[in-house]
Image (cartoon, rainbow, N blue to C red):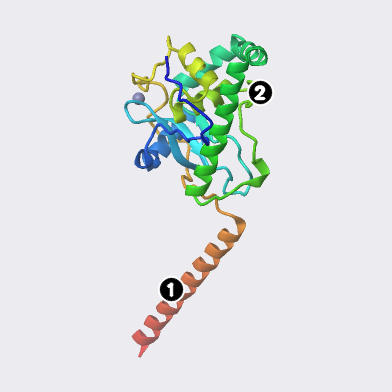
Amino acid sequence: MPETPGNGGQPTERHETLDAEQRVPTEQDLDTLSRQLGRPVRDVVEIGARCVCGNPLVATTAPRLSSGIPFPTTFYLSHPVITSAVSRLEAAGLMAEMSERLEGDEQLAAAYRAAHEDYLAARDAIGARTGVGEVPEIAGVSAGGMPSRVKCLHVLVGHSLAAGPGVNPLGDEAIAGIAEWWTADRCYCGGAWPTTGEAPNRDRSRHVKTQEQQDVEAKKRDRAEARRRRAEQEQEDSGAE
Ligand SMILES: [Zn+2]
C-alpha cells in the first residue's frame, strides 16, 4: 500500500517523483514522446515521470501553451502500455464506480480534494519555473474531473506517477488496477512504440513560432541575403579593377 502523507493542516506540500535534473526533457525524450504518442509533441516543458529504464512515462505541459492558450492538463500519460491498460479500466466502468464512491465516502472525497489541490500547486510551480507565470484563466481548475468526479483516469494516473504514491488516491488505485499489464518496478518499453524511421516530429522546440517571430526571421534572412549580394558585388568590382 502506498504511504499516505499526513496533511495535518499544513499548507499543501508539493510532491514530485523526479528531481530537477531528471525532469529536464532531452532531445531523445522529445523524440521518444513523439513516437509514443504517434504525433509531434509541443510545449512539453518537463518529464513528469520516467520508466526504470529512463524513458518518459508522463509529459509535463506548461499551463500556458506557446500559442497563448491556457492549458489545464499538466501531466499527460504517454507510455502506450500504461495508456492502453488504463483505457481497459475506463472501458470496464471504473470511472462511474469511483465517482459514485466519492459521493458516499467522505474520507476518499477529502483525499481526492487534496489531490486536486496538489495538482494545482504542482501546476503553479511548473508555471513559475518555466517562466509561464500565473494563468488566471484556469485558476482553481484542475483536470480529470477533480475535485469531485472522475472523468479521465489517464489524467489521474499521470498525476499519481508524477507526484508519487499517496497523493492521488484514485490515480494510485488505477495504477494498482493495471498491475497485470504494468508495474513501476519493471521496463515495458520494448516493442511498445515504433523506434525505426523518422519520429513524427519536425519541430521539437517548445516554442511554436508566432507570426511575429516568423516575420522577424524572414527580415533577418532578407538582410543576410542582401549582405551576401553586396559582398559578391564588391568582389566582382574589385576583381574587375
Ligand atoms: Zn522502459
Instruction: Answer with the quarter of the image where residue 215 lies.
Output: bottom right
**Residue sticking out furthest to the left:** 53
Mark on residue 30? none
Where residue 94 sits in the image (x, y, percent)? 59, 12
Q: Is residue 134 left or right of residue 18?
A: right
Tell which tag, 1 or 2, sits nearer the viewer.
2
Say which residue appears at 48% left-offset and 28% top-offset: 78
Q: Position of residue 99 (x, y in %)?
A: 65, 16
Above/below status of 69 relative to 81: below
Count of numbered tags: 2
The amino acid beneath tag 2 is Ser
Disc 2 crowd, CA 10 A, few/some/many (<14, 14-19, 20+): some
Split into quadrants, the picture shows ligand 1 in the one at: top left
Q: Quadrant of the C terminus?
A: bottom left
Q: Residue at x 40, y 83 (%)?
A: 234
Classify 230 as above or below 19: below
* The label number, if any, that marks residue 148 in the structure image: 2
Visible residue check, residue 234: yes
Residue 45 vertical position relative to residue 10 in the rendered view, above or below: below
- First reached walking from the N terminus: tag 1 or tag 2: 2
The residue indicated by pointer 1 is: 228
Pick the residue in front: 99 or 23: 99
Which residue is pictured at 45% across the width and 30% down the height? 162
Tell me the amino acid under the disc marked 1. Answer: Arg
